[in-house]
Image: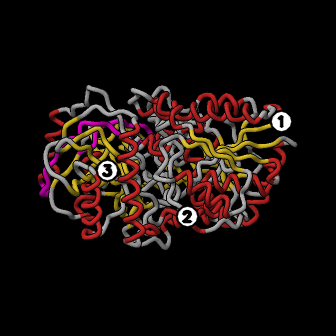
Amino acid sequence: MSKIAVLDFGGQYAHLIATRLRGLGVYSEIHLPGSAPARDGRFAGVIFSGGPSSVYAEDRPDFDTAWLELDVPVLGLCYGHHLMTQSQGGTVERGKVHEFGPAELEYDKNCPLFKGIPHPSRVWMSHGDEVTNLAPGFKAVGWTKDCQYAALENAAKKFYSLQFHPEVVHSVDGEAMLSNFLDITGIARDWNMGSYAPILMETIRKTAEGRKVFLLVSGGVDSTVAFALLNKALGPDRVLGLHIDNGMMRLRESEAVMDYMAREGFDNLRVVDATADFLSALEGMTEPEKKRKCIGQVFLDVKDVETAKLGLNPDEWLLAQGTIYPDTIESGGTKNSEVIKTHHNRVDAILELIEKGLIIEPLAELYKDEVRALGEELGLPKELVWRHPFPGPGLGVRLLCQGATAPEAPTESVTKASELAGAAGYSASALPVKSVGVQGDGRTYAQPLCLDGKLDWTVLEKLAVEIPNQVRAFNRVVWRAAGVGPFVAVEGYMTRDRLDLLRSLDAAVTDWMIAENVYDKIWQMPVALLPVACGGKEVVVLRPVESREAMTATFWPADEAALGRLCTRLLELGAGSVLYDCTHKPPGTIEWE
């Protein structure tokens, strides 16, 4: 069977390329770029992924140039765009302007890569380097306001490269561009995803090899689908689920999980309240990565205690997880990728179990949209499959913590950001707290910038793109939707009182989404509580986003009147100010930690 080779340079979206090709009916394989390619005609084309490195850096990923000598069409994306240019004799340098988020692509309509594409086309950027001199035989076939070489073509060699990411859903016509590349390769579209569930179940049976499987079930989409798949593949007598209440669940979440699992006939699920264990372990902890790793380890510790109580023989059991691919890539789980944030299912103890072959992860190659499609194929009800995603660490990554020392943004950065905001009619102030972001396939940990002024989503979106692109000290832009007064940093830790406040605020947001009939219009709406006060009360952040697979996201603009009703309720519950996150991903991750 002919296939497409995707070379993984460690980019956040490398595996997503293969998923998009699957959706277009073509089989693809991920390869390390330093490996030698087979020369037996099995590859109809090659795609170079993005990556966090610079092509001129000493520690750049290994690359075997034989991949460019297969006499097949090649498409380079972001880092791959730079690599193709440099390897063919062009020049790549650090860019004067960094692009993160949406951009308008103008292009040469004669280039076959853009056949049938509307002009201009909105594309998704995430880069700090840029092509400054073209390689011989190449010409520019696409450009944006800040990037003169956004798309390149060498028609004689059928080499193409794009500075942006067509594989992400927020490149509006990106899938059509990938489809056009497949047409250029001439590959047959004979890969059928309809039989994927039986393939997964057969893999589960082979991996389990007669053993039983123990799964931690959070009640979220991923673990629920994994639990259903395991039950169907192995039978409920070989599967045991454990739901651990870590004290960081939503209001009455654990009770709801058990209720709907029982309604769906899953009677092989147990529940344990381990709130005290988690809060004790997290006491005084503030750094996001340490918090995430601690939560992941305590999950395992509680699991060990419970399996010991049940008298389970470890030689007869495998641990299963509902890990999906974004968990792996954001945790730095591929050869050339960077750690953005360590997911609870990718802590060191889990990695050791994986090395020993003691973990089974049936969804590990899938993205959220594919997991949902699989859930529907398994017959799970809509309310389970289409629940808003909720992180495994729960509110633990939405309750930001901070000690006595708060960050202070450089004066020149605040001045520059204030100038950009002021030109659009807004005042700006740096929030005295840090949040996690992702820029150029790498992790950032920087301060958010808060804007005060009238509600104009178009202008706010523009500033949320422009400011992080030009001022590296800020990786998010938020707008103050309610509340007044200066922001004051306060000490804040993982405590029952703060969690209870966040729980009540989060529940009010969920009630609002349902009452306003917008729950199904928003992909996810995290609510974060900051160790920052206004008028002596802590500040809450609303983070509604639209996404498909969580690798990219756009903020969701709420109706002004409906938002006003929500803000009134949140202030009544004890919020000092209500902030609205207007940042796309990139440069901001969906969660603040």
Q: Residue 541 carries which label?
A: 3
Query: What residue is pinned by disc 2?
Result: 386
Residue shown at the point (53%, 56%) measured from the top left: 549
* Magenta segment, prevailing SS (helix, strand or loop): strand
Q: Position of residue 3 (x, y in %)?
A: 71, 55
Does label 3 or label 2 sit earlier along the sequence? 2
**Tag 1 residue:** 316
**Residue 214 versus residue 424 in the image, above or below:** above
Q: Is residue 59 left or right of residue 537?
A: right
Residue 338 seen in the figure:
no
Question: Left or right: where does residue 308 sit relative to residue 411?
Answer: right
Q: Of the residues under marks 1 and 3, which one precedes in the sequence?
A: 1
The colouring scheme, among rainbow, by chain, secondary structure or one colour, is: secondary structure
Residue at the spot 63% in from the left edge and 48% down from the top edge: 217
Can you tell which quarter of the image residue 414 is in?
Answer: top left
State the image quarter where residue 61 is shown. Answer: top right
Q: How crowded is mark 3: few (under 14 residues within 10 Å), some or many (20 or more)?
A: many
Question: Over which residues does the magenta segment extend?
Answer: 423-449
In the image, is residue 238 part of the stretch drawn in magenta?
no
